Amino acid sequence: MPKFSTQRDWQLAQALMQPALIRVIDNIRKQLEASSWQGSYQTEQVWPTDATPAQKQQFEDLQGQIRQAQSVAEIDQIEQQLALLPTPTPLYELQLKAGNQLQTVDVWQLCYQVCFRDYTPPGDEDYPVAVDSQLLNEEAGSIDWDKLDEKASQIIGHIFEQLPPTEAQGEG
């Protein structure tokens, strides 16, 4: 997860991430329709290396309990217990396949590239991110969907341009 420059950037990112995910997924679909590559999505939970099997099971059990909780007090109590446990990081990957070629793309990283200005991919986690303010209509207090779609389209287009040629595409 990126480190945020300010609390405001964190709040803006919260508002932008779901719309960015929607635009990223839609633009992947459009690119796949025009491509010889086939795409599928994989989800996985990555646990911290120090998480024990018992902690993982307790986390899963509490997640089940929270879905069945009957009161706010019960939810609060379960959330307090969850806060004491290691938490998995959800991975959401796009698997692109053409013939015997396989490429994997981290969908969350694509969303970060859309949401943040000059986003640097993993490896530089200490570098704080700032929301791309051009994606927001601050006067109206809303998201500029056209600019969001345009940026997502450019990023996804670049991903597909970087894919190696397939037999169906030829060398041409």
Image (tube, rainbow, N blue to C red):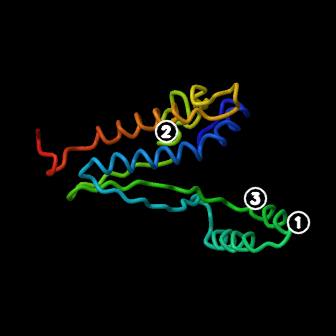
Distance from label 3 to label 1 (Cα)? 15 Å
Label 3 environment density (alpha carbons within 10 Å; few <14, some 14–19, many ≥20): few
Front tag of 1 and 2: 1
Say which quadrant the C terminus sits in: top left
Label 2 SS: loop
Using the image, tell me which numbered label, if any, was put on residue 73.
Answer: 1
Where on the picture, by quarter, is residue 155?
A: top left
Q: Nearer the viewer, residue 118 or 161?
A: 161
Mark 1 surroundings: few (<14), some (14-19) or many (≥20) residues within 10 A = few
Residue drawn 72% across the image and 70% down it:
67
Residue under label 2: 123
| Label whose residue precedes the other's in the sequence (3 or 1) | 1
Question: In x, y percent, where is residue 40?
Answer: 38, 59
Alpha-carbon span between mark 1 and mark 2:
40 Å
13 left or right of 158 in image? right
What type is the residue that disc 1 sits on?
A: Ala
Could you tell me the amino acid type at mark 3?
Answer: Ala
Q: Position of residue 70 (x, y in %)?
A: 83, 73
Instruction: Look at mark 3 in the image and give the residue it sits on.
Output: 83
Q: Amino acid at mark 2?
A: Gly
Closer to us: mark 3 or mark 1? 1
User: Distance between the Cα atoms at labels 3 and 2?
Assistant: 26 Å
For label 3, the SS is: helix
Residue located at (81% from left, 61% from top): 80
Nearer-N-terminus badge (3/2) = 3
